[in-house]
């Protein structure tokens, strides 16, 4: 099979398209013929090994010292079950499935083996492979961030970095909760954000949201780039500040701020419960949530895809169209 290999840590050019042996499912695993693989900033961070300081050492030990222990990257997969390992009972050959592969990765290939006991679930008939592949990272994290902030009807929520995959879901889920949403991202993403329901949009390249005089009941910082102090001052009493990509200094300041008690600073990694994936896919199938697919790159253009994702220009999600049928709904 064809697979994109990460030969060492570094820029996008370290990725290579190779012919490698097709995997066989072990007991408890399913073999998936991959149609689409999501490309996230997390994939790019693994490839370049750009990690925040508090996870640097454990991540290096887990992922690989000098290069990725699993050279085939890709943390989101959508495809068709090709074969079943011994003992698999939840799926059958021919099922359309999607889910996260986590740090087991392996989605940048024509076939991938996924544990049945993980977060794999079926794709609704109304969803394409490309749409399904983009749900795990953005959807699970966006849902987690919004649940932790718990916006109430009528509250004001600001989402910094709203135009990517996580922000796309966080914007819509906050609106579903009845909040008034201000979305912060570059101008090229404003139309999409308005279409998704954002009440206000701010261009971070021309306006600092903390200087507008507006105060919020919750701020969800997806990208982790807003300054801590000014962001806290932009919160109402009892406000919640969620750090989606926290740095060590922000976490320490957050602990101090929590002792003061005026606002609550939150930082917690999202899990991958299949129940949350099922909730999200049903919301999408019921047209309560939308998935915006920006671009689908062929497998051989993985280098260009990584460059595009790292540029910050992507609107919604970006996928690898592994089979040439990523837009298919079955």
Image (spheres, helix red, strand yellow):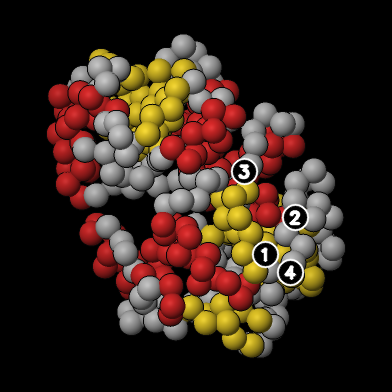
Q: Is residue 89 visible?
A: no
Left or right: where does residue 225 sit relative to residue 144?
left
Q: Which quarter shows the N terminus?
A: bottom right
> Is the Cβ of the residue at disc 1 closer than 8 Å to that at disc 3?
no
Q: Residues within 10 Å of mark 2 (few under 14, many from 20)?
A: some
Give the residue pinned by disc 3: 292
Give the residue pinned by disc 2: 327
Q: Is residue 46 above or below residue 17?
A: above
> Is the Cβ of the residue at disc 4 closer than 8 Å to that at disc 1?
yes
Point 40% across, 67% down: residue: 46
Give the Cα distance between marks 3 and 4: 20 Å
Q: Position of residue 293 (x, y in %)?
A: 62, 48
Left or right: where does residue 249 sit relative to residue 32?
left
| Precedes in sequence: disc 3 or disc 4 | 3
Q: Position of residue 216 (x, y in %)?
A: 33, 19
Give the residue pinned by disc 1: 321
Give the Cα distance between marks 4 and 1: 6 Å
Question: Number of numbered discs present?
Answer: 4
Residue 120: quarter of image? bottom right
Residue 7: quarter of image? bottom left
> Is the Cβ of the residue at disc 1 closer than 8 Å to that at disc 2?
yes
Give the Cα distance between marks 1 and 2: 8 Å
Q: Residues within 10 Å of mark 4 (few under 14, many from 20)?
A: some
Q: Is residue 147 visible?
A: yes
Left or right: where does residue 82 sit relative to residue 180?
right
Q: Position of residue 2 (x, y in %)?
A: 66, 81
Q: Is residue 3 above or below residue 276?
A: below
User: In what element is the residue under mark 1?
Assistant: strand
């Amino acid at each position: 099979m064809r697979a994109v290999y990460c030969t060492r840590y570094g820029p996008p050019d370290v990725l290579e398209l190779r012919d490698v042996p097709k995997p066989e499912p072990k007991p408890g695993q399913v073999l998936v013929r991959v149609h689409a693989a999501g490309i996230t900033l997390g994939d790019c961070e693994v490839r370049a090994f750009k990690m925040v300081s508090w996870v640097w050492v454990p991540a290096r030990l887990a992922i690989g010292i000098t290069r990725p222990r699993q050279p085939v990257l890709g943390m989101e997969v959508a495809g068709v079950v090709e074969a079943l390992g011994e003992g698999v009972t939840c799926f059958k050959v021919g099922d359309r499935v999607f889910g996260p592969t986590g740090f087991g990765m392996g989605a940048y290939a024509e076939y991938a083996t996924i544990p049945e006991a993980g977060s794999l679930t079926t794709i609704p008939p109304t969803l394409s492979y490309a749409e399904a592949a983009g749900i795990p990272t953005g959807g699970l994290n966006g849902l987690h961030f919004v649940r932790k902030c718990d916006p109430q009807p009528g509250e004001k929520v600001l989402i910094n970095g709203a135009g990517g995959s996580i922000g796309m879901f966080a914007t819509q889920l906050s609106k579903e909760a009845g909040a008034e949403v201000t979305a912060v991202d570059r101008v090229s993403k404003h139309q999409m954000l308005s279409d998704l329901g954002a009440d206000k949009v701010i261009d971070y390249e021309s306006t600092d949201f903390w200087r507008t005089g507006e105060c919020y009941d919750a701020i969800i910082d997806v990208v982790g780039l807003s300054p801590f102090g000014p962001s806290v001052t932009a919160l109402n009493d009892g406000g919640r500040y969620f750090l989606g990509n926290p740095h060590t200094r922000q976490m320490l300041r957050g602990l101090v701020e929590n002792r003061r008690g005026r606002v609550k600073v939150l930082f917690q990694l999202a899990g991958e419960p299949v129940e949350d994936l099922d909730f999200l896919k049903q919301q999408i199938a019921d047209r309560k949530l939308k998935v915006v697919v920006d671009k689908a790159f062929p497998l051989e253009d993985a280098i260009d895809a990584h460059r595009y994702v790292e540029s910050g220009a992507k609107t919604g999600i970006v996928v690898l169209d592994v089979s040439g049928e990523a837009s298919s709904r079955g």
